[in-house]
Image: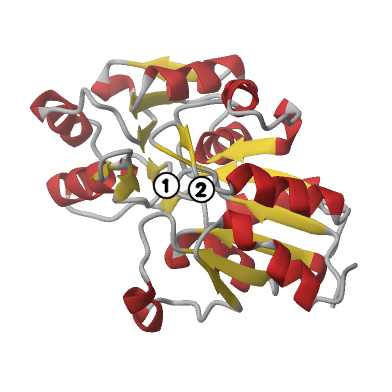
Amino acid sequence: MSFSAAIVDLDGTVYRGGELLPGAARGVAALREAGLDVLFFSNNPTKDGATYAADLAELGIEISPDRVYSAGAATTRYLGEHHADDALLVIGSEGLKAQLREAGLALTTDPEAAEALVVSWTDGFDYNDLQAALDTGEVPFYGTDPDRVVPTADGRMPGSGAIVDAVAATIGHEPDAIFGKPSAVARRLVLDRLEASPEECLVVGDRLDTDLLLGDRVGMTTVLVLSGVTDRAAIGDGPVDPDHVLAGLGEVETVLEGAGRE
């Protein structure tokens, strides 16, 4: 099988803690030299495409902002389609809030005025946020992404999923939907941007339950890299049996060679 496109994760795949991972630039170059349309997708909801593109450029990887997506973009798309005229109480970063405002969505800090609750990562999360979530009452409850931990330069840190879980435990029910990979919203977002069928796509990432599950659900070839949060021992317990397992993105050329590319 030959490939026409690739969806590539960022944190733990291309970089870790803001530092380019060994071989990552070589891996991206190999995908492009093989003629693949490369799209990046991160479950970090705090940045928009332009910010991600600028960050990647600083690491030596040039990409157009419209080829970089995130859980923030998926969340914004869903809320724009289903809550365009509603007041949103957002527990999340200023970067996420800026994306929502840029899309014309209305945010409120008054729990009693909220018509939907959106929960995401923020390093300012505290007791007052739990109280605000509780005070919103019976409104729709959404999470930007399910990642409970994210890789850092020195190890790992709590992600959006940890905060979503804390809010869910407080208000007594699970979110009505969680966006980002592997959600249907995220799948639709990337498939709308790729001029290739899922069967012609690679999905490359360090998480079985998000990156690879997104691709597996639509028939993409899945490539796990061991440079992020997943180690080889965890593979058998995950929801996806990867088609390929690599030490890092720098080895992706072996997948392309195996597919018969010159």
* Foreground pick, 47 / 23: 23
| x 53%, y 58%: residue | 248
Residue 127 at what x, y percent from top left? Answer: 9, 29
Out of 115 and 181, give the one closest to the viewer: 181
**Looking at the rendered structure, which numbered label has been put on residue 145?**
1
Q: Residue 46, relative to residue 172: is it above or below?
A: above
**Number of residues whose C-alpha sits closer than 10 Å to that of mark 2, classed few (under 14), some (14–19) or many (20 or more):** many
Q: Which mark is residue 82?
A: none
* SS type, badge 1: loop
Q: Amino acid at mark 1?
A: Asp
Which quarter of the image is occupied by the C terminus? Answer: bottom right
Please name whichever residue, 55 or 248, is drawn nearer the observer in this view of the structure. Answer: 248
Query: Does 183 sit left or right of 116 as displayed?
Result: right
SS at mark 2?
A: loop
- Relative horizontal placement of residue 218, taking residue 232 as reference (left or right): right
Q: Residue at x 34, y 27 (%)?
A: 92
Side (left or right) of 69 relative to 258: left
Q: Position of residue 189 (x, y in %)?
A: 68, 47
Q: Across the whole image, how many numbered discs are drawn on residues?
A: 2
Residue 211 in picture, x, y percent from top left? 53, 59
- Residue 256 visible in the snapshot: yes
Q: Residue at x 76, y 53 (%)?
A: 30
In whole angstroms, how far apart are the C-alphas of marks 1 and 2? 5 Å
Q: Position of residue 26 (x, y in %)?
A: 67, 47
Quick check: 144 above or below 51? below
Q: Quadrant of residue 132?
A: top left
Determine which residue is flagged by label 2: 180
| Circle 2: residue type | Gly
Binning the other alpha carbons within 10 Å of mark 1 as few (below 14), some (14 to 19) or many (20 upward) gives: many
Question: Mark 1 near mark 2, Cβ–Cβ under 8 Å?
Answer: yes
